[in-house]
Each structure stands twice: as structure tokens, then as C-alpha cells.
Image (cartoon, helix red, strand yellow):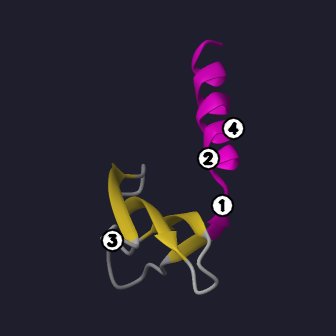
């Protein structure tokens, strides 16, 4: 048996809101990724970007890596 959802805690953003990276299998059986920003307090809204491919996540990592070398 394999998990259909794995969550990685990425800490908090600069506003103190928790950020998570989630790998999950959607209703069509496709494995995909989602980035979630959760609420830090009652004034915050939760935000999600889902349906990301592994290639897109790797491109994000590459962009961060090259920006850190500037």
C-alpha cells in the first residue's frame, strides 16, 4: 500500500503564515503537487496552487537557486 497524500512543512513565510508542499493523487488517479499557504490568524485566507507537475516544482527550485547566486 502506498500513501495517496504526503505533506511537507516548509515553515512560515515572511508574514508568519504556514506553508506546505503536498504530493497527492487526484480523483483521476494522477499524482500531482500543491503549494498551500495557511492562515496565521483570523484575518488571513488560505491559498492553494494545485495541479503542479514535478517539472514545474523543479523549475521553481531552479529559479530560487539561480536567484540566490545573484
Asked if labels 1 and 3 touch by Cβ distance under 8 angstroms, the answer is no
Quarter of the image that includes the N terminus: bottom left
Q: CA distance from mark 2 to mark 1?
A: 7 Å
Q: Give the label on residue 21, or none.
A: none
Asked if labels 1 and 2 touch by Cβ distance under 8 angstroms, the answer is yes
Q: Nearer the viewer, residue 7 or 43?
A: 7
Is residue 39 visible in the rendered image? The answer is yes
Q: Earlier in the sequence, mark 2 or mark 1?
A: 1
Q: CA distance from mark 4 to mark 1?
A: 11 Å
For the residue carrying disc 2, how many other residues have a C-alpha within 10 Å: few (<14), some (14-19), or many (20+)? some
Q: Is residue 58 magenta?
A: yes
Q: Give the label on residue 40, or none.
A: 3
For the residue carrying disc 3, how many other residues have a C-alpha within 10 Å: few (<14), some (14-19), or many (20+)? some
Residue 62 image point, x, y percent = 64, 29
Residue 61 image point, x, y percent = 58, 35
The residue under label 2 is 57
54 relative position to 4: left or right: right
The image quarter in which residue 55 lies: top right
Taking the spot 67% from the left edge, 31% from the top edge, the residue there is: 63
The residue under label 1 is 52
Is residue 17 visible in the rendered image? The answer is no
Asked if labels 1 and 4 touch by Cβ distance under 8 angstroms, the answer is no
Q: Is residue 49 magenta?
A: no
45 lies above or below 69: below
Q: Earlier in the sequence, mark 2 or mark 3?
A: 3
Asked if labels 2 and 4 touch by Cβ distance under 8 angstroms, the answer is yes
For the residue carrying disc 1, how many other residues have a C-alpha within 10 Å: few (<14), some (14-19), or many (20+)? some
59 lies above or below 70: below
Amino acid at each position: 500500500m502506498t500513501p495517496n497524500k504526503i505533506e511537507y512543512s516548509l515553515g512560515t513565510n515572511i508574514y508568519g503564515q504556514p506553508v506546505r508542499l503536498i504530493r497527492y493523487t487526484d480523483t483521476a488517479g494522477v499524482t500531482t503537487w500543491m503549494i498551500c499557504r495557511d492562515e496565521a490568524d483570523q484575518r488571513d485566507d488560505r491559498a492553494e496552487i494545485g495541479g503542479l507537475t514535478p517539472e514545474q516544482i523543479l523549475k521553481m527550485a531552479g529559479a530560487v537557486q539561480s536567484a540566490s547566486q545573484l
